[in-house]
Image (spheres, helix red, strand yellow):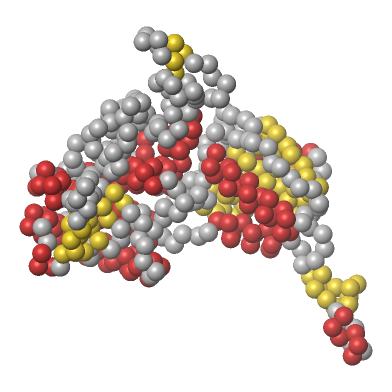
Amino acid sequence: MDRTVTLQGNGAVHPRISRQRTELVLSQPFFGALALRLRMVEDRSAKTCWVDGESFGYNPVYIDSLTDLELRGVLAHEVLHVANGHCWRRGPREDRRWNEACDYAINPIVLSSGFVLPKGMLNAARFNGKSAEEIYGVLTQEAKQKQPKPDSQPQPQPDGQSSGPDGKGQGDKPGDKAGEKPGKQPDGNGGGSQPPSRLGGPNDPVTEPGSSCGEVRQYQGADKPVKEAEWKVAVVQAAKAAQMRGKLPGDLQAMAGDAVRPVVDWRAVLHRFAQQSSPTDYSFATPNRRYLHLGFYLPSLHTPAVGDAVFVRDSSGSVFDETQAQFDAEILSVFHTLKPARLIVMDCDTRVTQVQVFERGDSPEIKPVRGGGGTAFTDPFNRVAADGLNPAFLVYLTDMVGSFPATSPHYPVLWASTTPLTRARRAPFGETVEVIC
C-alpha cells in the first residue's frame, strides 16, 4: 500500500480543495474561517479524509471522486469535528465507534446548514441534538444487546450450518460490528463494502455502519490544552464574524455555544460534594498536641464520624451500563475515602427495586442494577424517611426525566445528570452536575 504523506504549504494545496475552501469563506464564513486554520496534508494511505485538530488529511483519489458540492460538504464536516472538540474528547473510547458517534452528532448540522454530503453518510433522526458522548453510549449499549448470550442455543441454518457463540456459523463473532453481516470485515474508515443496516428508528434513513466521509483523529501534540483553547477562541470569533454578516444558522449558534462551554469533571464535583457534606469543626475535646508542651490548651480540627452515604442509581434503563459501572467505581472511591458509617446503594425506576447496605470496614461489592420501566424520583426519599435514616448526603444518578419530590429533604442532594445540563430538566432542590463518561 502506498503510504505517501505529503505536507503542503499555502502554495501547494490541492486545486479543488483550494477552490472549495474559498467558496466556504465567501458563502459560509464560519466554516471558511476555521478551514483556513487547518494545514493540508496529502495522505494516500487514507481511505477518505481525516482531521486531527491541526491538519486536514486527504487522499487525492477520494477528493477527485467527489462533486464540488460534496467536497465543500466534506470540508465543512471535518471542520465541524474540530470545532466540536472531537479531536480532544475521545479518551479511552473505542476508535471506530467514537468516529461513528461524532458523525451522527455533526452530520445533521452540516446538512441543515445547506451542505451536500456523499451518499452513505451516517445520519439518524433519533440522534439529532445529542452529543457524541451520548450517542457513543447508545451505540455501545446496542452493541452489547446484540451480542449472543452465553447460554443461547445454536439455531439451524438452511445450509446445515449453525449460528451462535461457537463462532462456526452466522452468529456474531468477537469483534463483529453490531448490524454487520458475517464475512464482511470492517474497511477501516468506511466506504461501501458493508451492507445497509437500519440503525435508527422507523423514520430514520437507511445508513451503512462505518460509512463516513472522514475520520476524526486525536491530537497527539504535547500542547493539547493550548491547542484546544486556541480552537475554542477561534470558534467564538468565527461565529461572531459570521453572525455580523447574517450567515450563522441557528443550529450553528447553539453548537458554537456548546463547543466552548467549559467541561467540569463530575468525579471531582462528586468528591468535593461528599467532603463538604461531612461535618468538620474545631473541638476542645481533643486538644491540639502540637502546643501542649508550651502550656497552650488549643482546640484541634475534629472530624466526627460521617453519617450514612446514600447513592441512588436510576434503574429505568435510561442510564447505560458503561455509565453505571463508572458511577459504581466512584461510589466505592467515596466510601473508602470518607469512611461513612454506612454505604447505602438504592436502585429505583418508579419504585425502589434493590437496596444494598455496607458497614464501615466492609469490602463492598456492588451488585448490578436491578429494575426497568418508568422513572420517578420520590420513592428513595420516602424510603430514607420511613427507615429513619439520617444521611450525610444523597447522590442520585439519572437522566433527570421523571417526577421529583414535592418537598426538599433536610440533607444535601447531588443530582448526577447523564443528560447535558443545557437540555436536562431542572431539579427543584439540590446541586446538579453533568456526568460525561
Q: Which sits in the foreground, 20 or 236?
A: 20
- Side of 417 where 57 appears, left or right: left
Residue plotted at (39% across, 58% down): 88
- Side of 407 where 129 appears, left or right: left
Residue plotted at (39% across, 33% down): 177
Residue plotted at (42% across, 35% down): 175
Looking at the image, which residue sits at the far bottom?
294
The spot of residue 271 in percent (x, y) is 64, 59
Q: Which sits in the foreground, 410 or 140?
A: 140
- Residue 348 against residue 63 in the figure, above or below: above
Q: Is residue 420 visible?
A: yes
- Side of 340 where 436 appears, left or right: left
Q: Is residue 250 visible?
A: no
Q: Which sits in the foreground, 123 or 422?
A: 123
Residue plotted at (51% across, 46% down): 418
Q: Which sits in the foreground, 135 or 113?
A: 135
Q: How many marks?
A: 0
The spot of residue 198 in percent (x, y) is 33, 27
The spot of residue 160 in percent (x, y) is 40, 10
The spot of residue 122 in percent (x, y) is 29, 38
Looking at the image, which residue sits at the far front?
1
- Residue 242 against residue 160 in the figure, above or below: below
Q: Quadrant of residue 185?
A: top left
